Amino acid sequence: MQKDADGFYTPGDSASAEPAPEEEASESRTDADVTDLIKSTFEVSVTLADQQADPNSPLFSAKTFEELGLNPDLLKGIYDMGFSKPSKIQERALPLLLANPPQNMIGQSQSGTGKTAAFVLTMLSRVDYSINKPQALCLAPSRELARQIMSVVVAMGKFTEVQTEYAIKESLPKNATKVTAHVVVGTPGTMTDLIRRKVIDTSAVKVFVLDEADNMLDKDGLGEQTLRVKNMLPKNQVQIILFSATFPDHVRNFANKFAPNANKIELKRNELSVDNIRQFYMDCKNEDHKYEVLVSLYQLLTIGQSIIFCQHRHTADRISQRMTAEGHKVASLHGAKDATERDAIIDGFREGKEKVLITTNVIARGIDILQVNMVVNYDLPLMAERDAAGHRGDLHPDIETYIHRIGRTGRFGRKGISINFVHDKATWQQMEQIERATGKQIIRIETNDLDAMEEQMKKALK
Ligand SMILES: Nc1ncnc2c1ncn2[C@@H]1O[C@H](COP(=O)(O)OP(=O)(O)OP(=O)(O)O)[C@@H](O)[C@H]1O
């Protein structure tokens, strides 16, 4: 079979080497530690209705879910989840996604604005529950996100007969021979493996969703594996749905080819991140000082919940071990941990058992935990430039990852704070580039004035 420059039409060959599996979107809010700060996050949720009435808000909608032509069992599921009105992306995307004949979609909307519900409702709407074969496949970049998406499928499909299955590491017994579930959610390596071994029969697949699509299509990352999955699906009967908060130029062409003739919903460059996330930076003296500053912030970090992002797994391990040894309670999560441990860590964090999670880019995207009101970029996200021959060059800030990282707070109109640690000229310049690229101001806070910082934070979260 012929293969073009982007690798289309190439049946994949090797087995999976991949990211990993699983979650659950609980929203347990603890009312321990009811300080002013946490009170303000509760107050914010009360104003959500106002935000949905503001035409400039990404949560605005002129319509109701009834008007979007959803089936009554799904409407029940939506109301059971506590949604009263669609968000802007849901209002705009759902009529296009649900129209017949089905059309592909490339949809962009800021973090935390409800993209998941748009594609989950489409998958559930298109499934024929009388056929016991996979009909909707969804891929995500991490096991944590796949598990979270599945929890939304299960919650929204509560009043339907939907059967679901994971395609994530260690989700199926080794000797499993056939998946009969209607909706399969997973990561690309395991999905490829299951399709290739014919455990997943793709003959009845009608919908193929890529969440975090720019990441899933990135040729330096998961792009090849994702393409392999696509090339094992039937031709001409699959609606392809790509969603993300970011679609950098270098992925857009590939996305257009991957989802031909798609309806498109796009954001302007200055709309990429939501305004309810206030961005700060702290000028640290050196690497060691970053650690000291983080420790000094511990009390503020634990008022709500916080995610600390590091560039490397070893940094996440090192600072979490050091903080633990010094008597602080923190959890750490990265891709080198095994599947069961990862699941336990993210579930514990969701349930609020741990308040501080130290991690890497593995959960930079998609993870939705409403009570996270602070994100710290202990290290700024960086990526290596590549020359035409694919050789790695200088490091530069990874703008997309930055936008996704800070988007772990400020979900669906809530307020949030992000703090970048900079410690030398290079990191300072990288932060400036981020500021320019996103068009959002990043405000300095002193590293040695915790009172001032608390004050700033109160203001930001009010
Ligand atoms: N119409 C709605 N009404 C109320 N809450 C909603 C609605 N739609 C989604 N939500 C909630 O908003 C939160 C964010 O939604 P979701 O995780 O789908 O965001 P997203 O756009 O996929 O973000 P990201 O780009 O970070 O993946 C979730 O907690 C979800 O339950």
Image (cartoon, rainbow, N blue to C red):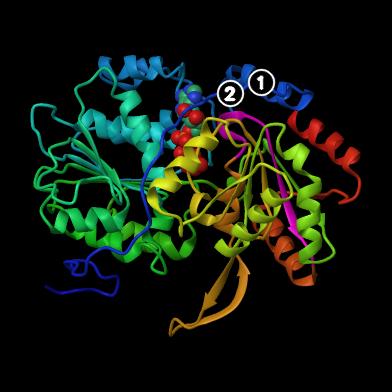
Stretch in magenta = 409-423
- Residue for point 54% across, 37% down: 349
In the image: residue 430, left or right of residue 11: right
- Residue for point 41% across, 32% down: 92
Residue that badge 1 annotates: 42
Q: Position of residue 196 (x, y in %)?
A: 14, 59
Q: Which corner quadrant holds the N terminus?
A: bottom left
- Residue for point 31% across, 66% down: 224
Q: Secondary structure at mark 1?
A: helix
Q: Tell me which amino acid carries mark 1.
A: Phe
Q: Which mark is residue 29?
A: 2
Q: Position of residue 223 (x, y in %)?
A: 35, 63
Q: Are marks 2 and 1 in contact (CB under 8 Å)?
A: yes
Q: Position of residue 353 (x, y in %)?
A: 57, 32
Ranked by sequence position, the earlier of labels 2 and 1 is 2
- Residue for point 62% across, 21% down: 45
Residue 194 within the segment the image draws in magenta? no
